[in-house]
Amino acid sequence: MKEITRAAIAIVVVCIILFGVNKYLNQSSGNASSDTLTIFNWGEYIDPDLISQFEEESGYRVVYETFDSNEAMMTKIEQGGTSYDIAVPSEYAIEKMKENDLLQEIDHSKIPNLSNIDPYFLDLAFDPKNKYSIPYFWGTVGVVFNPSLLDGQTFDSWESLWDPSLEGEVLLVDGAREIIGMGLNSLGYSLNSTDEKELLEATAKLKELTPNVKAIIGDEVTQLMINEEASVAITFSGQAADMMWENEGLDYSVPEEGSNLWFDNMVIPKTAANVEGAHEFINFMLDAEVAAQNADYVGYSIPNTAAIELMDEEVTSDERFYPLEEARENLEVYKNLGLEMLGKYNELFLEFKMSAN
Amino acid sequence: MQTKTTKAFYLIPYYVWIVLFVVAPIALIAYYSFFDLSGNFTLDNYQNFFTSVYLKLTLSSFWYAFLITFFTLLIAYPTAYLLTKTRHKQLWLLLIIIPSWINLLLKTYAFIGIFGLYGPVNAFLNVFGLEETQILFTDFSFVFVSVYIFIPFMILPIFNSLDKLNPSLMDASRDLGASSWTTFSKVILPLTINGVKAGIQAVFIPSLSLFMITRLIAGNKVITLGTAIEQQFLVTQNWGMGSTIAVFLIIFMVIIMIITGQRDKGAYANGKNK
């Protein structure tokens, strides 16, 4: 009995010490006060040098945290455990966050650098007049492929994916919107379709793709393509840029029938503790030189005209990553279809996945 | 010197634990399963579960869980038997257990490299003049990795029951003229069946809800109930449907527990008293 009591006391003491140490560490890393700025961003989505530069210029201390899906990010902001001052959701997530009243309005007078942004990317349907969000990066969904492993196929059309010669070669991204959307696009329908018949048709078409499917995965795609484990993958443009950076033999194409055009944007959550600092940060990131440096580091396409002028022309004239406006006409932005419809998409995607084996 | 009250006092933490972390979560899951997306009370989720998608899902989950358990048992039983015959039992046992201390995800990621087209397995096959074959993202790789991960959980209970076996029983069986097979099937197996059952429980039940391995090793071509629950909560945000699948998973688990449970109460009590 004595030993048990002693052990119990020891455990309690250790817990108290660990709790104290944890608290001390948190304090020294500073949590939610007026001289810190807490940023919540995707992984590998900013040049870390810019954070130190911003700290120097503004005097704020930056706490930087990352997330790996819009859903996870929203859940964390909704819980409100940490008061994030800046978050970077995608367009459909912004619509949802607006609905749930998680965002605060951005004061444009505090962001003079907004004039650097290409008007094409302003005042879009998901956030009229950019009341709640400022564009950060944008891109497309397309096909990254390895010509040396293929015999001359190009992916100007989604149809090429169904080619029998690609048996067991195609990697798909594990996202219901992306894949069902691709099926819809390949049939010439809108990727925001809510028409039952079109959706079923798209799923049936996707099921025919299954012999060619190698796997349906997430970020592991990057490594597999770099190592030439597969010859074709459906992925996001920025991820494709990463792969092409590592393996110069790869190429990227956005099929002509249409695809997804997406935007990631900076927002200020309702729970922000340092609203002033958040505005300063947004303005800082829109600065031409800063944005150019950031785009060089991250590899995604920026909406910042002034920055594009400063960048290497070889990069910015690459129509695979900076498609011309005419080419963008075939691209569609995801609309928030509501949870009901998202569930439907997901069930169809599940059905497709189950037929993949 | 303990009175009844002090005994009851010591039980309080236990009851608090059970209520907070066992009863309450299960009750919450059951509760959530009766609500649809907009928070209305409904039985639709249950009806939805009986559509072809989810039924197929359940069947395929069971099929893969069965395969995994079968192969794990096939390897674990002889291994456990040999272990009891070795001189440094505890050392060998430790060597088998140590890999289970390593994080599951880490081991899984390692297999992506090992099974890759240019990984060591294919390099090895190349030596024998075989061409590179696709190993990753197949049924084989999925079952292989799962079996690898679950083996310690099957070996341990079987080892324990084999170790407790009185060797003179086997000698007696041989003396009386039984062949090796008869000795095994009539003496060893019946006396260690509880270990086997415990092992099956420890492997089959978690196999039903595997989800990380299905993505990383099977490339989402194998879908289990676990994947479906994860998707419902994280992507679709349909907590009701996710909970409903979880409720069925719990029901399946209870059924398995009953089937593989120790029916012979006397033997159970004996084992416990040892």
Image (spheres, coloured by chain):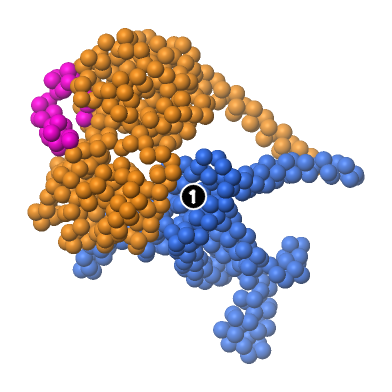
Chain colours: A orange, B blue
Depth check: give the residue in front, B97 or B259: B259
Q: Is residue B260 visible?
A: yes
Q: In the picture provided, is B239 more to the left or to the right than A171? A: right
Depth check: give the residue in front, B20 or B126: B20
Q: In the picture provided, is B203 more to the left or to the right than B56? A: right
**Residue at the extreme bottom of the image, as rendered:** B177
**Residue at x 43% of width, y 41% of height:** A339
What percent of the width, then of the height, locates residue B141? 37, 61
**Amino acid type indicated by mark 1:** Ile
Depth check: give the residue in front, A86 or B52: B52
The subunit carrying tag 1 is B
Q: What stretch is highlighted in magenta?
A: A301-329
Q: Mark 1 points at which residue?
A: B229
**Residue at x 44% of width, y 11% of height:** A35
SS of the residue under disc 1: helix
Residue A119 higher or lower than B231, as above or below: above
Residue B75 higher or lower than A115, as above or below: below
